[in-house]
Image: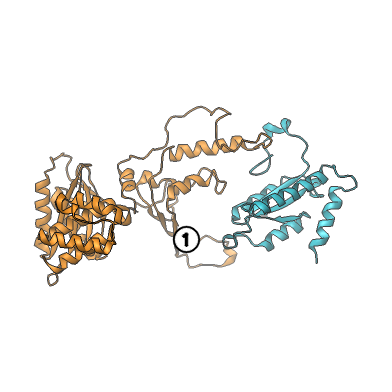
Amino acid sequence: MDETVAEYIRRTVLKIPRDEIKMMLQKWGFLSEAQLQTLNFHQMKDNISQEVVQLCEENSADIKQAAVLDIIYNHIYQNKRMWNVYQMKKSGDELEYFDITDFKKKFKGRLQSALKNVTITFKVYEDNAIWIRVAWGTPYKKPNQYKPSYVVYHFRTPYVFISASVLKSNMPLLCQALVVASNYHDICEMELRSHSLKSLKDIVFKRYSQNLQTYCTKPLPGWNVEPENADIRIIHENRSEKERIHRLNEEVFGSGPQPIIEFAQYRLETMFKSDPKMDVLDKKEPFRCLVRFSSPHLLESLKSLAPAGMADAPLSPLLTCIPHKARNYFKIRERKGLFPESFVSP
Amino acid sequence: HLATSLPLPSERDHLRPRIDLVVFMIDIKSKYSLKNVKTSLAHVDASFFLGKVCFLVTGVGRVNACSIETNAICKLGKAYCSPVLFCELELEGIRVATAQRLLRMLQICAGHIPGVSALSFVSLMRNSDDD
C-alpha cells in the first residue's frame, strides 16, 4: 500500500471522535466484520488509527477506498464545512431521465480530459443526492488529498451544493463538468452560503415553515404569549401590543424552526445622506459600506428581536426576506426614483 | 404594572389605580432602551417629577457589554430631577436589595411613611449625589 494512502487513512481516522470510529468503519465496509472485531476501540486514538492502517494494508487499500471513507466522514460532519449553493439552468423544459452511470462517466471524462491529476469519488445517498469528492492536482503534481472539494447534487433538482477547497481556481472547471454531465446548459452561483447543509436544502426546496397565508381573526385575549403571568399581582399594560408583535412574527417567520444561517451580508453602494451643512462627502460618490450580521442561528435571533423589545415589529424586509429570496448576500443600490419597489439588485 | 413604553394604552385607563411611582428601567446594554425611555418621558405629567419618578439602570454587572455611558444617564437624572439607581438583575443579592429600595421609595411616595414626603425624600437623595 502506498505510504501516502496509509498516512491519509491514518489522519482521516484520527479526525473521527473515538466513539464513532467503529460505526464509520462499518459504514465504509472496506474492512470485514472479522477484522473490525480484532480492533480495540478503547485505546488511544493514535493506536486505533495505526491498527486500522495495518488492516487496510492487509486488504491493499488504495486512494479510491480511502476517499470513500473521507466522503462518509464529511457526510456525517457536513456542518463543519461552508457550503455554497449553485443553480443549473436548462435551455428547454424537457424532463430528461437521469442516468447515474452516464452522469458519472461524463463528469469524470470532462475533468480528466482537462486535468490529468485528479481523484474523483462518488457516493449516492438515499435522499437522491450524489456526493462527489474531487481532489485536485496540477499537470505536474499528484492530487492534494487534504484539500478536496465536495459537491452534493440532488439529481431531481437543478440545485448543487458545493464546498470548495481553498484552491478556488478549479471552480470553473468543476462547474463546467457538472453542467456537461447533467445535461444542463448553464450554472450560476446563488448568493446563499451557510455551514448547515440541511438548512440550505430546506431553503431552496422550500421545506421550512413559511409565513401563514391564512388571515386568522384576532387571537383570544387569553392567548398565551409568554408564560410569565404566574404572579397575578403583575399587570402587563401592553398585552395587546405583545400579542400584535407575536402575531406579526408568526406571519413573517412561520411557527416552525428556522433554517440555520450564520450570517447575512449587505454591501451598500448607496450615497451617504447627511445634513448638507455638515459638508461630508460632497463629491456624491457612493459610500462603500459592508454590513454583516452574524450569529450561530441568525434567523432565530432575528425572530426573537421584536418579542425581546430590541427592535420594532415588523422587521425590515431586507432581513426577513432571506429564506424567501434564498439568499444571504445582498447588494443594495440607490433607488432609481420612479419605482418604489425593492432596490435590491438581483 | 409593567409597560414597555409610554403612553399607557388607553383601553385600560378605568382599570388602573392611582400611580405613586414611575420607575424607568434602562438596560445599559441597549441604546434602544435609553431612546425608548427618553421618548416615554415626554408622556409623563410634570407633577410626577417631584419625587415620583426614578431611573433604574440594569445590567451594570456586565462591564464589557455596556452600550450607554453612565454620564449620559446621570445627566438625564439631573435634567429630570430624579434619582438614578444602578443594579444588576442577574445577581440575586443585588436584585433583592434593589427591590427593597424601590419598595421603600414607593411607601414614601404613596404617603405611607408619616413625616416624609416624596419631594423631601428626593431632595435628600439629590444632596448626596452632588459632591
Q: Is residue A170 above or below residue A105?
A: below
Q: Where is A242 relative to B28, above or below? A: above
Q: Position of residue A118 (x, y in %)?
A: 14, 63
Q: Residue at x 45, y 51 (%)?
A: A337
Q: Quadrant of the N terminus of chain B?
A: top right
Q: Which quadrant of the figure has residue B123? A: bottom right
Residue closest to the eye, A187 or B72: B72
Q: In the image, residue A149 lies at what x, y percent?
A: 23, 59
Which secondary structure lies at badge 1? strand
Question: In the image, is B126 to the left or to the right of A137?
Answer: right
Q: Position of residue A106 (x, y in %)?
A: 10, 52
Chain A, colour shown: orange
Binning the other alpha carbons within 10 Å of mark 1 as few (below 14), some (14 to 19) or many (20 upward) gives some
Q: Which residue extends farthest right?
A: B115
How many numbered marks have been drawn onto this rendered protein structure?
1
* Residue A340 visible from this viewpoint: no
The residue lying toward the viewer, choosing from A183 and A276, is A183
State the residue in front, A127 or B42.
A127
Q: Residue at x 9, y 47 (%)?
A: A101
Query: From this viewpoint, is residue A112 visible?
Result: yes
> Hue of chain B?
cyan
Query: In the picture shown, does residue A306 fall above or below A2?
Result: above
* Amino acid type of the residue that numbered disc 1 sits on in the rendered structure: Met
What residue did someone put label 1 on?
A271
Q: Residue A136 at what x, y percent from top left?
A: 18, 64
Query: Which residue sits furthest bottom?
Result: A140
Which residue does the image show at 68% across and 41% down from the upper left?
Answer: B7
B85 relative position to A87: left or right: right
Q: Is residue A277 above or below residue A263?
A: below
Subunit under mark 1: A
